């Protein structure tokens, strides 16, 4: 593949435009009273407790960060969060979410596994389930373990084979989703949301002996809050745009509640990301006809794709179509999708990175040509657009379409070291203002100083890691996951990756606290942080986090030889 005729300009993604991932563990409350457990024909049981490189700079940064405030509520001013309803319902909802975020799977009562042989016919199985008051069974089939639920029964009735002669192995789901007993409860919830399932296996190992039980969504919600509705369920059950809007609007309130209760930023980001995708998916189901959904892939990109966006900033989405597929009224459908998201509180992208724009709504072959122009055609916005696309994650439809486009990027690169270097050089796009950060602790004579935390901290860290992921063909999307993959593949020291992960989480936490403060003051959330709003420990931790980022930029400069470009 020929090298580009024109070196790409400095790259910037959504983190540099002008527009504006786990919780601390604690024992949860008792799940059910004794009378509740006795009422069931099959009482649940509790789960049982059961993976030559450059040296990292700025070791002292990690020490300082370790001493910095870790919880978001400790980072922000106590009055920084937006005004909240102090009603009994709001307090109850807050306790529910805290219970969800601070409990582990082992704290919840689990259903005893009920095993059947894969050769059992459906009629006999349903009779056995009815006698025991169950709605699921684990299926043994040779060395495999599967699960059969009432949802599978619905689909089985459509089979041409009569139920009395249909073996359960033909309709059961094998290799079902599972969690560890010591996993945090929110992980089980996110797994259910992501795969749109109502049960997960709880297991300590890979063999049958390690299966502890089955965690059901109803049991989880009974543990959390007497069957209160989660936002995701409201979104899934929405039958109108107004109902879906009501669910989407609750996400911001959830962020404020979790922040006020000190839930760690990576937990908030993971949960918010899954809820946003539920909203996007349900909206697409409402607006797009079935044939369009089957022949397209709806994707989110940028910080939303990485799972690192918390406060709604702007939309970054696209639609990839199967080659040869056409849809009447497609422009109207995509325009309505964008407009609905705006109405739901997701601002439009100032750069037009939305599926309602032709550039971001193409068939796969045409989009591959667009990728070629971005990489080898000297397109001024090509590097920025490519950076955003590299964070793309499928939300609905045929994910193979996105994979085909993403694989084409690697094909076009062909180990082009020169392009990797020019792509990574964007980390130097924003300077440090003459070393202002060295004066952070005192702020003498700089009472009104502000910094752009994205440009100076988050963007260079995120983009530098993204460039390394591109070079080494790492599939992970989240920055922390990419860093771990770099360690696992021998491309970065573990201590360095930990420093960068700590710095990123601190910077995102600081940005979130600042955004909530801005919202409480009636200002739009942005990236500018007034240094006078920070306490002494926060300023010191910010200084050390930015020192780690600066060391990372120097690491990248040596790795890619920026001085030779």
Image: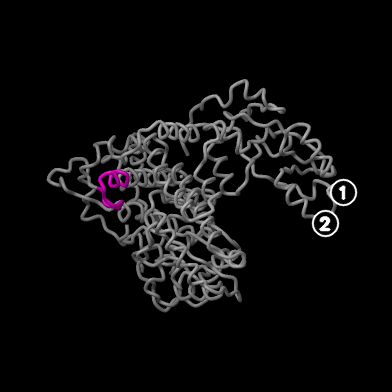
Residue at position x 27%, y 53% in the image: 452
Q: Residue 444's x, y, as percent?
A: 14, 43
Q: Position of residue 529 (x, y in %)?
A: 26, 48
Residue 491: tell me if it is visible: no
Q: Earlier in the sequence, mark 1 or mark 2?
A: 2
Q: Tell me which segment is drawn in magenta.
A: 515-529
Which residue position is annotated with label 1?
A: 165
Mark 2: secondary structure: loop
- Crowding around mark 2 (Cα neighbors within 10 Å: few <14, some 14 to 19, many 20+) is few
Residue 129 occupies which quadrant of the picture?
top right
Q: In percent of the image, x 52 and y 71: which residue is there?
A: 330
**Depicted 273 relative to depicted 416: above or below:** above
* SS assignment at label 1: helix
Q: Which residue is mark 2?
A: 160
**Image quadrant containing the C terminus:** bottom left
How many other residues sit within 10 Å of disc 1, few (<14), some (14-19) or many (≥20)? Answer: few
């Amino acid at each position: 593949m020929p090298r580009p005729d024109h070196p790409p300009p400095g790259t910037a993604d959504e983190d540099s435009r002008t527009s504006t991932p786990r919780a601390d563990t604690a024992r949860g409350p008792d799940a059910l009273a004794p009378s509740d457990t006795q009422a069931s024909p099959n009482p649940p049981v509790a789960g049982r407790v059961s993976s030559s490189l450059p040296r990292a700079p700025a070791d002292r940064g990690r020490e300082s960060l370790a001493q910095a405030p870790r919880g978001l509520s400790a980072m922000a001013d106590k009055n920084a969060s937006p005004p909240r309803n102090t009603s009994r319902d709001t307090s109850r909802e807050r306790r529910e979410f805290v219970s969800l975020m601070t409990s582990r799977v082992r704290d919840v009562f689990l259903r005893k596994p009920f095993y059947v042989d894969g050769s059992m016919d459906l009629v006999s199985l349903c009779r056995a389930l009815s006698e025991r008051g169950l709605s699921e069974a684990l299926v043994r089939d040779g060395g495999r373990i599967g699960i059969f639920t009432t949802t599978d029964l619905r689909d089985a009735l459509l089979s041409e084979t009569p139920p009395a002669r249909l073996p359960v192995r033909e309709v059961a789901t094998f290799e079902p989703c599972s969690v560890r007993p010591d996993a945090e409860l929110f992980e089980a919830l996110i797994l259910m949301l992501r795969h749109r399932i109502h049960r997960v296996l709880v297991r300590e190992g890979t063999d049958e002996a390690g299966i502890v039980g089955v965690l059901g969504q109803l049991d989880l919600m009974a543990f959390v809050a007497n069957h209160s509705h989660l936002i995701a369920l409201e979104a899934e059950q929405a039958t109108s745009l107004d109902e879906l809007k009501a669910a989407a609007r609750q996400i911001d309130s959830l962020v404020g509640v979790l922040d006020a209760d000190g839930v760690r930023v990576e937990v908030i980001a993971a949960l918010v990301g899954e809820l946003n995708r539920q909203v996007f998916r349900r909206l697409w189901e409402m607006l797009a006809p079935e044939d369009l959904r089957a022949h397209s892939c709806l994707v989110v990109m940028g910080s939303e794709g990485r799972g690192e966006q918390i406060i709604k900033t702007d939309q970054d989405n696209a639609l990839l179509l199967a080659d040869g597929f056409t849809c009447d009224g497609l422009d109207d459908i995509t325009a309505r999708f964008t407009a609905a998201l705006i109405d739901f509180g997701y601002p439009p992208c100032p750069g037009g990175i939305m599926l309602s724009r032709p550039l971001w709504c193409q068939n796969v072959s045409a989009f591959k040509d667009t990728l070629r122009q971005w990489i080898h055609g000297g397109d001024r916005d090509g590097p920025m657009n490519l950076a955003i696309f590299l964070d793309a994650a499928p939300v609905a439809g045929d994910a193979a379409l996105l994979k085909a486009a993403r694989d084409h990027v690697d094909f076009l690169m062909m180990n082009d070291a020169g392009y990797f270097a020019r792509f990574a050089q964007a980390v130097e796009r924003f300077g440090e203002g003459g070393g202002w950060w060295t004066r952070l602790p005192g702020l003498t004579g700089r009472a009104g100083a502000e910094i752009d935390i994205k440009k100076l901290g988050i963007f260079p860290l995120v983009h530098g890691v993204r460039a390394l992921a591109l070079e080494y063909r790492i599939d992970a999307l989240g920055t922390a996951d990419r860093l771990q993959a770099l360690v696992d593949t021998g491309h970065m020291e573990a201590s360095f990756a930990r420093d960068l992960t700590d710095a990123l989480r601190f910077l995102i936490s600081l940005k979130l606290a600042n955004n909530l403060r801005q919202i409480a003051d009636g200002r739009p959330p942005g990236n500018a942080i007034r240094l006078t709003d920070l306490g002494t420990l926060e300023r010191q931790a910010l200084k050390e986090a930015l020192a780690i980022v600066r060391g990372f930029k120097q690491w990248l400069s040596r790795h890619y030889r920026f001085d030779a470009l």
